[in-house]
């Protein structure tokens, strides 16, 4: 499978950095470094989840999954977010406990050096995943790459905290930094869960991409033609769009088919990996304007755009 290779590197990196961060914690006793190590556990779990989900998403269309299997990427992203939130809760609980019962930290310079090396590994793997994810339009790779970058910033925060502990001798700063780390991790988890929820609920494409689809359609329409009930969604790297094409009732099937072909080509040129479904209707028929709950919403949006384009009346 082409998509699985980048995540193999992520799994190997997660195993290596987990060992390094655990060693840093045991050497120092720092709850901040423990929080960093727990995030490495999350990295490993989510990397394995992402690897398995991408293998499933790469399966071809079959009789039971006629739209493909790519929606599992949203499910995987949601699992990653939930696991991150659980880890953040565990870190916060332990940090609060240590805040009230501080412990003397040991060998801070050694632990910091080990943690810095682990962070460098995560940064390299994150950049690799983000490049691969953008090139292949994989939500899972991009989500995991962003998570690893969060881990890098987390480590930077932890090391800053350890530096302050070393300079000031205030042991409680270690727990405070761990609480801040927990908050940062939790925010990442919330974002991943939100993105997953949107995808599983067939959230429409971003406004910019919808605009590209509309421009492609309108560029192919002749006088006396229109369209409505445009619906869009995304699954993995694929975009889906369907709408009703309103044409004169006397237009031949052959001419309508040619027009549909031009519209589909224009949409695919504007939006890569797009699959378009078009339903043709006679523009003169009243029923053609009443066959979708989206029509009133679109008409209101059109009026709003027209009023906006006209601008305020001259004084």
Image (spheres, helix red, strand yellow):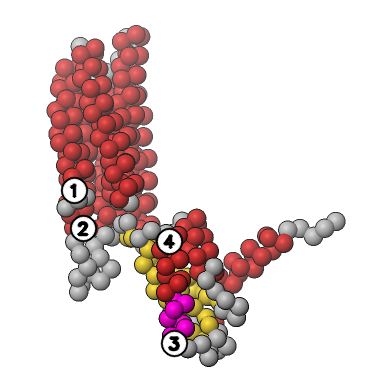
Q: On the rendered image, what quadrant is the C terminus found in?
A: bottom right
Q: In the structure shown, which secondary structural element does the residue marked by tag 2 occupy?
A: loop
Which label's residue is closer to the chain start, 1 or 2? 1
C-alpha distance separating marks 4 and 1? 28 Å
Badge 3 vs badge 4, beta-carbon distance below 8 Å: no
The overriding secondary structure of the stretch rendered in magenta is helix
- Residue 153, quarter of the rendered image: top left
Front-lying residue, 9 or 74: 9
C-alpha distance separating marks 3 and 2? 36 Å
* Label 3 crowd (10 A; few <14 / some 14-19 / many >=20): few
Q: Is residue 108 above or below residue 62?
A: above
Which label's residue is closer to the chain start, 1 or 3? 1
Report x, y in % for residue 233: 39, 63
C-alpha distance separating marks 3 and 4? 24 Å
Residue designated by label 2: 58
Report x, y in % for residue 101: 26, 20
Q: Nearer the viewer, mark 4 or mark 1?
A: 4
Residue designated by label 4: 269
Which label's residue is closer to the chain start, 2 or 4? 2
Residue designated by label 1: 4
C-alpha distance separating marks 2 and 4? 23 Å
314 part of magenta stretch: no
Extent of the magenta region: 253-260
Front-lying residue, 208 or 47: 208
Q: Is residue 106 above or below residue 123?
A: above
Residue designated by label 3: 253
Which label's residue is closer to the chain start, 3 or 2? 2
Residue at horizontal 69 percent and vertical 63 percent from the top: 307
259 part of magenta stretch: yes
Report x, y in % for residue 267: 44, 65
Q: In the structure shown, which secondary structural element does the residue marked by tag 1 occupy?
A: loop
């Amino acid at each position: 499978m082409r998509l699985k290779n980048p995540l193999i590197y992520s799994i190997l990196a997660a195993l290596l950095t987990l060992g390094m961060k655990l060693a840093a914690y045991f050497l120092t006793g720092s709850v901040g470094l423990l929080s960093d190590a727990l995030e490495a556990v999350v990295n490993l779990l989510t990397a394995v989840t992402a690897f398995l989900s991408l293998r499933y998403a790469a399966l071809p269309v079959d009789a039971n999954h006629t739209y493909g299997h790519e929606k599992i990427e949203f499910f995987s992203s949601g699992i990653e977010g939930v696991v991150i939130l659980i880890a953040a809760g565990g870190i916060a609980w332990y940090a609060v406990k240590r805040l009230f019962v501080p412990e003397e930290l040991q060998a801070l310079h050694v632990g910091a050096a080990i943690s810095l090396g682990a962070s460098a590994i995560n940064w390299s793997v994150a950049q690799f995943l983000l490049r691969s994810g953008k090139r292949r339009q994989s939500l899972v790779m991009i989500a995991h790459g962003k998570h690893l970058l969060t881990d890098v910033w987390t480590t930077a925060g932890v090391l800053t905290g350890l530096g302050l502990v070393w300079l000031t001798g205030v042991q409680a700063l270690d727990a405070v930094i761990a609480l801040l780390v927990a908050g940062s991790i939790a925010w990442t988890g919330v974002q991943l869960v939100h993105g997953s929820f949107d995808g599983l609920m067939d959230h429409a494409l971003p406004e910019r991409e919808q605009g590209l689809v509309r421009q492609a359609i309108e560029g192919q329409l002749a006088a006396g033609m229109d369209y409505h009930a445009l619906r869009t969604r995304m699954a993995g790297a694929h975009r889906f769009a369907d709408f009703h094409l309103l044409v004169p009732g006397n237009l031949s099937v052959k001419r309508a088919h040619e027009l549909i072909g031009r519209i589909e080509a224009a949409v695919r040129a504007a939006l890569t990996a797009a699959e378009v479904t078009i339903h043709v209707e006679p523009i003169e028929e009243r029923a053609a304007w009443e066959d979708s709950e989206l029509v009133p919403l679109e008409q209101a949006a059109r009026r709003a755009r027209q009023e906006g384009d006209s601008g305020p009346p001259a004084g």
